[in-house]
Image: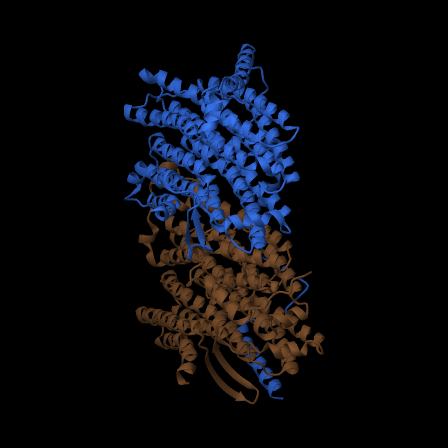
Chain colours: A brown, B blue
Amino acid sequence: MIGEAFVPLALLACSLVPAAVVAWLGEAPGHLRNRWTLGGAVAKVAVVGLMMLGVQAGQVYDATLPLAPGLALELRIDALALLFVSLSAVLWLATSVFAIAYLAKDRSQRRFFTFFNFCVTATTGIALAGNLFTFFVFYELLTLATWPLVAHAGDRASLQAGRRYLRYTLAGSVALLLGILLFHGLAGALAFGDTAAVLALVEGDRVVLTAAFVLMAAGLAVKGAMVPLHAWLPAAMVAPAPVSALLHAVAVVKAGAFGIVRLVLDVYGVEATRELGLGLPLLLWASFTIITGSVIALRQDTVKKRLAYSTVSQVSYIMLGVGLLGPIGLVGGLVHLVHQGLMKITLFFCAGALEKLVGVTRIDQMAGVGWRAPWTMLAFTLGALGMMGAPPLAGFVSKWYLGLGGIEIGAIWVLLVLAGSTLLNALYFLPMVYAAWFKVPPVAGDSPDAARAKAMNDLFAAPWLVGPAVFAASAALASGLLAASDLSPLAWAELIVERQYLVPWPVPE
Amino acid sequence: MTALLLVLTPLLPAVLAFLALVPEAKPVVRRLAWIAAVPALLTALLVPAGSEVVLDDVLLGLRLGLAAEARLFLGGAAVLWLLAALHASAYLELTPRTPRFTGLFLLCMSGNLGLLVAQDVAGFYLAFAQMSLAAYVLVVHDETAKAYRAGAVYIWLAVVGETCLLLGFLLGASAAEEFALTEVRRALLHADGAALAISLLVAGFGIKMGLVPLHVWLPLAHPAAPSPASAVLSGAMIKAGLFGLMAFLPLGTAPLLVLGTLLVAVGLLTAFYGVAIGLAQSDAKAILAYSSLSQMGVVASGLGVAALLPDAAPAVLAALGLYALHHGLAKGGLFLAVGARQKGADGGPLRPVFALVVAVAALALAGPPLTSGAVAKLGLKAAVETGDAVWLQGFVLLLSVSAIATTVLVLHALDRLRQVSSQRRAPTTEVVVLLGTTAAAVLAGQVLTWGAAPTGLRDAALSPSSLREAAWPVAVGVALAVGLRRLHWRLPAVPEGDLLTPLQGWAIRACDRLRLAASPSVLSTRSPMPWVRAPKLPADPSTTLAATTVAMLVVLVVSLLA
């Protein structure tokens, strides 16, 4: 059907067309550029909304472009793809608003917004990819599109960070490519979801399958920032705040995590992964990353760096959920894909707003900042509490399902990882919250309360800078508070697992 | 109506908490904060036991309802929160920090009242965590060094407690394969991992109750908080720990030997330890805090008896509810009295009224005949004796000894309360509010405890033998106190938080070490994987990058075609 093929392409076009137009428009007319960027983002949210109804009803959209026998670019929208696409569409809209406000005085906005829109195109492609080949093409496009954003400032530190980013991601891509080749050599060109074929191969080609899995997982784990492949991410913190926000919540890191989800669920399948005994190593690696990332975060003294290491830790929750290979854990991992995005983008919006509004970039400058930027810090507080897993925020729901998933398969030790992570998160987030609301900035001649009486309303002063943070924080609150409703990310994650991957765990005797 | 009341119980305080931060609504909310507790009070009075409302969309399927044993807790907590909110509106000076206090006070109230009506684990956890975390702001409100220290100890123990509870709840919910509270409790009786779950729950709730050695936050936080906040901390919030244990421990079916022995031992230890350290305190609020500690020890030991003797469990649980009601309002009233005195609302013609109120509240804690304490203590003893075990005689005797100790301690508190002084004379309206709420809390404690006691217990409490039974420990206690006073209270001085002082030196060193590590450029500039050296790229990598990507695609296409 034409309609079915049209929809995925329309989704790509929503961002690709603005990218081209912004490039063509040139540097001068800011309004037009902003209108195209926002218009594309709004259109995309609308298309995603329509598709959601279709997918919920069981519709599968598919667009295939055969390049050669056995090689095709395939775009397909299933429930899992839509989970990622809807997250990126909504957060991209928020980030666009934020970026326009954040970069209002920047000199190279044309380049920035061109690649910004290009980047979302690539992410959409990753989400919609229907086979490994398509996935890899868009995965590499993403690498290409993100580099100018990371190095945007153009100074020495940015260029260095950009180079480091390239080294890591290229090395990862090589591993991924080798893995894909190995897999194709054995299994042929399989569409995502055709896992029965892989299961049939497990008996005979255990070693090759395992090697291919390891190569692909390692390649994906670079973008997914799993320790020790994560060092590019904190270095990339030199990028402007909107870029950090999208790197961490939607695009690059998420693409890596999403890739691992696809690898386990749709390339190998839960049963083959279990047969090969690859769940436990993934689980251990994720757990190690969760704890190590948090420990390193403790030692950071700039806001963005601390947030970066927090991402390293939090994204591995997704890998943890997948590695559990049981239905409940899977729900936890998938739902965290969305939840982590909402909470982390809140925190980065706040970091950016603090930098622009009150000039705060280091943690020791945060004293009393809650009184100078109350809405920003309110959003930050919600995000931080969510990361700790405090109810009713989104992070609580993720942690709840991951914990239940761990117990479900008899891995009680997963609870210890979650508890350790909670405490470490408290250790590095609570002091920031505390400083913002309870410490008093050194102000000459004013008593603490007098200094506080001069509180300003940052939301009214800079609505486009602070508004996105408040929006994302509200979304994080709502998706936890209304987790049991039919429209929540949790309901969607449950739908995915129920529909696509329901595999009862063989209960140990 | 039932459903509406149940929903409004936690919701109204939460909504008002948000409004307290809106600039235009701030002053109104500050004055009318007490309204937030009204739905809870009505729920306690009107909602039939066992009713339930299920909100399918909220959290993980929120269930609200009123369990039979929750009614007394809810009533007592609602009255105390209401009076404390009124008290606070007169007690707090207007500063830019006041809205922060009002908002978080209401959020805390929402959590405290919400956990009493929550009927599913996730909802309970939400309410409990909300209460615990929000209370931090109440503790540090004064922003003195003392308050910050108390707050730091409080928040870390609270976070650890929450984590223990989360794990316990997860294990319980997993065993029950359901989130309803009653199912989880049932599952905790037999399921694998139940022992682990119960240990975690006891640790988590034990921190809130202040069971030794998890009590160190309590004697720091109560004195540091503004008095209306101390009142709810001591009168309502620490009861949440007891309520949590009652709600989740599978009591009344089979004897739980380890758990019961542990609770009896730790409870009695806490009961006497609290008095001993309390006597070595000089600040009235610290003494009252240690007295709360000691009383929570008594109820914990009662809970232990219920765990050991399933036959006695229903009676003991009912008696503990009554005990919590009595203690919550009497102790809450005493903290409010300290607040009234701090604000100079006790002088002038109303001085005898103030003295009477304080005397009734303090005596009630000791439990001489005719007071709420006498009923509560008799109820507990009678309930314990419905069990069948040789050691119960000894246990009951220890309860009487603990009453002696409590008497000495509250008299010590009264002595110290006289030294709380104020530079100012409160204006009449303030006096009415501050003193009125104090008196109302104490009076409500007496009336409600007597009113809620079963008829049999009320009659028994008035019988000559019980009067004697209630009188002698108090008489001995008074004699001891007088004797001690003659000796000028020659007792050693122990810093508030006792065990904490040696622990803290160690903790500070550990924290310092962590902070020191947060110096710039540690790990951030160095690659953490020095053994993997990526090939050096030319200075401008973009062309190389593009070339590499294209090359990879070509390799991929070619190899797939082959």
Q: Quadrant of residue A290?
A: bottom right
Report the residue at 43% width, 71% height from top: A56
Residue B336 screen position, x and y as percent: 40, 27
Q: Is residue B223 above or below residue B190?
A: above
Residue B262 screen position, x and y as percent: 64, 36
Q: Quadrant of residue A218?
A: bottom right
In the rendered image, is residue A299 in sight?
no
Quarter of the rendering occupied by the C terminus of chain B: bottom right
**In-front residue for pair B22/B230:** B230
**In-front residue for pair A300/A473:** A473
Please indicate whether residue B427 sits to the left or right of residue A480 in the image. left
Report the residue at 54% width, 28% height from top: B382
Q: Residue furthest top?
A: B486
**In-front residue for pair A371/B438:** B438
Question: How many discs mark residues in the rendered view?
Answer: 0
Residue B47 screen position, x and y as percent: 38, 42
Residue A442 screen position, x and y as percent: 43, 40
In the rendered image, is residue B289 in sight?
yes
Please indicate whether residue A456 sits to the left or right of residue B489 in the image. left
Q: Is residue B471 above or below residue B181?
A: above
**In-front residue for pair B450/B346:** B450
